[in-house]
Image (tube, rainbow, N blue to C red):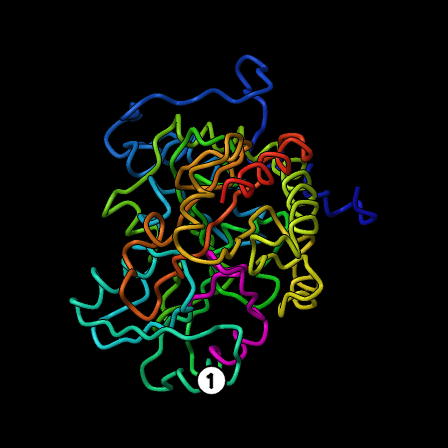
Amino acid sequence: MSTDSSTPDFSTTAIHAGQDFDPTTGAVIPPVYFTTTFVQDGIGGFRNGYEYARGGNPTRDALQTLLAALEGGDRAFSFASGLAGEDTLLRAILSPSDHVLMGNDVYGGSHRLVNRALVPWGVSLSTVDMSDLDAVKSHIRPDATKVVWIETPSNPLMKITDIAAVAELAHAVGAIVVVDNTFASPYLQQPLSLGADVVVHSTTKYLGGHSDVLGGAVIVGKGVQVRGESLADKVAFLQFGVGAVSGPMDAWLTIRGIKTLAVRMDRHSSNAQTIADKLVGHPKLNHVYYPGLPDHPGHELAARQMKSFGGMISLQLADGAAARKLAESTKLFQLAESLGGVESLMCYPAEMTHASVKGTALEVPENVVRLSVGIEGVDDLLGDLLAGLEQV
């Protein structure tokens, strides 16, 4: 528990923010509001501002209150998917001729969104190794860069970006700093407190935590403006006007998942650390990518800006054939896209999550597999991986 009684512990916030008991019945868990429309007290007489479910729903509002509290943001917005949230945010910021600078090791879908949907609209895109501050500075265009997009740890090579340092470079030219905090979750990392302007999540992953609900979130920091207008207001309008909102059951499932986020992330992290430590030096592996390892180039930085190192590991094998063989040889680590659930998953990024950047400068090496380490018994998980490696 926090020593400052005015600031609740993260776990307390995760359980209680936006979750007041139902005043009518006293139900501890607020009800799910399965309704598309709301009766008005006369024309224009909205009850608590509710008119139509695309514009607002009490269950979605509860999730948005919770998300803002967890990230320390001013306002949060819940979407039908992570990419829907990213698209809405980018539309709120960008105009034709604007420039986006993005890490060269981000989720393939985020790069595809900008490259395939926004570049034809007139936006320009550059990618850079965000862990190289000199390279970041040289790629920022003072007259055009409006968004600097950070993903740390990155997907899938686990690069660590200095959020505060990149934010300083970006803010010098008036750019908005967006951090995809999906891998870390707000329990392990607080980008807004480090200088970022906006945080995005695929809530499908660690926030939902059970591989049973699709969703996305955008959390805007206090006082962030774009061209003299409130960015939160612009996102709110587009959330309503474009309509890619989360449904009430999706919002409720995400809330339920968040209640155990802290205890899950502690277990994800401890399991991943144990596995990474044990796999270093394995004869079938060329490299283990995990920021919790002392020889990881971003280890000290990650230790400063993260509570612990998370549940994601990538492994580099001898070649693509070996990587494919491992991906198809484990039992507890099931072969599937996505991450962040209680169960362990293995992914072959070159042909799965990052297939959209294959053949480009951003392609993932074909000898890399990505592990989403679950919360099962760590000895069982390690045994599964070692048995799989024996078959390579």
Is 173 positioned to the left or the right of 260 in the image? left
In the picture as drawn, the residue positioned furthest to the right comes out as 3
* Position in image of residue 146 (x %, y %): 36, 74
Q: Nearer the viewer, residue 223 or 273?
A: 273
The location of residue 56, given as percent across then percent down, is 35, 36
Please tell me whether mark 1 sits on a helix, a strand or a loop: helix
Measuring 27% from the left and 75% from the top, which residue is drawn there? 98
Q: Which amino acid does label 1 sit on?
A: Lys
* Residue 332 sits above or below residue 187 on the image: above
> In which quadrant will I find the N terminus?
top right
Residue 33 locus on image (x, y percent):
39, 23
Crowding near the residue tagged with mark 1, few <14, some 14–19, many ≥20 C-alpha atoms within 10 Å: some
Residue 206 visible? The answer is yes
Residue at position x 56%, y 41% in the image: 390
Q: Where is residue 329 in the image (x, y as percent from the top left)?
A: 47, 36
Q: Mark 1 points at which residue?
A: 137
Q: Is residue 376 above or below residue 95?
A: above
Quadrant housing residue 54: top left
The residue range painted magenta reads 149-171
Residue at the image position 55 percent from the left and 32 percent from the top: 342
On the question of residue 220 being in view, the answer is no
Q: In this view, does 282 lie above or below 11?
A: below
**Residue name at image x 48 percent, y 33 percent:** 254
